[in-house]
Image (cartoon, rainbow, N blue to C red):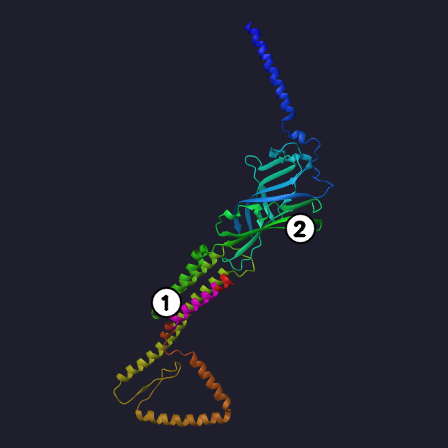
Amino acid sequence: MSVLLLLLLTLCLSCTHGNSWGEWNDSQLQPTIQKLMKGYNRYLRPNFNEGPVEIGMSLDIASIDAISEINMDYTATIFLRQRWRDSRLVFPGNESVSVDGRLVSLLWIPDTFIPDSKRSFLHDVTVENRLIRIFSNGTVLYALRITATIACNMDLTKYPMDRQVCTLQLESWGYNLQDVVFYWTRGNDSVKGLDILRLAQYSVESYYTSVSEAVYETGQYPKLVLHFALRRNVLFFILETYVPSILLVVLSWVSFWISQSSVPARVCIGVTTVLTMTTLMMGARTSLPNANCFIKAIDVYLGICFTFIFGALVEYACAHFYNMQNQTIEDVYRDLLREFSESNGNGSIPIVSSNQPNQSVEIGSTAEELTGRSANSATRNNVLSKEKVSGQGCSLSSVKDVSRRAASAFTVENPHNIDRRARTVFPTAFLFVNILYWLYYLFL
């Protein structure tokens, strides 16, 4: 008897569950991809022969991995989201259906591409990073994760105090404006992630979006553009290049306080600073394009520093030349005095002129002879001067006066004054040039 009761109870329960399952299938079961794809032609765009398809775009900038001045491009990883409405995918209800990304081949999708892209790829770990979501009103959300290397035309004339404006463009490859229309879903708010990016040499200064058209021979195509400005951080270059070059210039000035007789010390300082500055200039150009027409700000500054260092070396060459010239005249005069003191006291007087280095030195034997010779030479000079004036006129005398003044301008009585003036002229000139340099490249 108990066995019969158990059998009846089991039959009743099975009948009850069968009725509820059937009712749920009829009213509550969500549509499947097979039902949506029934009669769907993925080769025809939505609204075919009814107007263009409006496609909304939004971006998330995940990272900007590298910015290259040599290749003039940047590498970025972006999340690209596209929305459009396809009336063929409308289904009842208020919910959405998330479809496996591998079923994208069953749907029509836009042929969006990045025109300035040099290299790009779609991430595929662990599967292709695609997202497809279909809403009940037929709206399709299609998202991709892309890494692309995109060209960016850079102006390096103010490098490293430069500001670069790069763009990210999105265009339709095959559908023109009669077929597809692009728009930003939320204007400038359609782009996320740029505000929180942390780059090695740059900081994102500003960005904005725009809508335009791409005109080609085959027609007019929709285009969306993201503009963003990058400001280079100059602190790294100040510590890496500017401060060492300034210290090298100051080091070259140390030779002004070293005696001119210490030839090895001063030559060693001059040559060492010149070679070190040359190495610094070559190292500063390794991260920049070799073939370009830009005269960069860092090149100008390194050229200024090299000029001052080379000028300090040339200054010592001039000072040493005049010092040796004066020492030669003084040595000759000293020898004449020594010979006069060693003489037998017969009244001979050495006569030397130290004003003109090339003037010959004559030694007279007696005072009387010197007096006679001086009188004769004075008479002879007066006669010769009168003859020259009468024969050649005033033009020759004026030329001689000009040449004598020009020669006196290059005559240095005390070579040590060259170092004394250099101690003031070089720092003052370098400070003045620095003020002009930083005012021009930072504020103009």
Q: Pointer 2: what residue?
A: 214
Q: Residue at x 43, y 56 (%)?
A: 239
Q: Which residue is mark 1?
A: 255
Circle 2 residues within 10 Å: few <14, some 14–19, many ≥20 = some
> What span is in magenta?
421-438
Mark 1 burial class by Cα count in 10 Å: few <14, some 14-19, many 20+: many
Query: What is the quadrant of residue 185 in the picture?
Result: top right
Amino acid marked by disc 1:
Ser
Q: Earlier in the sequence, mark 2 or mark 1?
A: 2
Marks 2 and 1, how far apart at CA: 64 Å
Left or right of residue 119, residue 396 in this image: left
Q: Nearer the viewer, residue 228 or 10?
A: 10
Question: Please, what secondary structure does the residue beneath circle 1 have?
Answer: helix
Query: Residue 423 has which mark?
Result: none
- Residue 326 occupies which quadrant of the picture? bottom left
- Residue that appears at 65% across and 24% down: 26
Judged left or right of residue 430, residue 73 is right
Q: Nearer the viewer, residue 286 or 324?
A: 286
Q: Secondary structure at mark 2?
A: strand
Amino acid type indicated by mark 2: Ala
Q: Is residue 303 visible?
A: no
Q: Is residue 31 above or below residue 340?
A: above
- Which quadrant holds residue 164? bottom right
Q: Nearer the viewer, mark 2 or mark 1?
A: 2
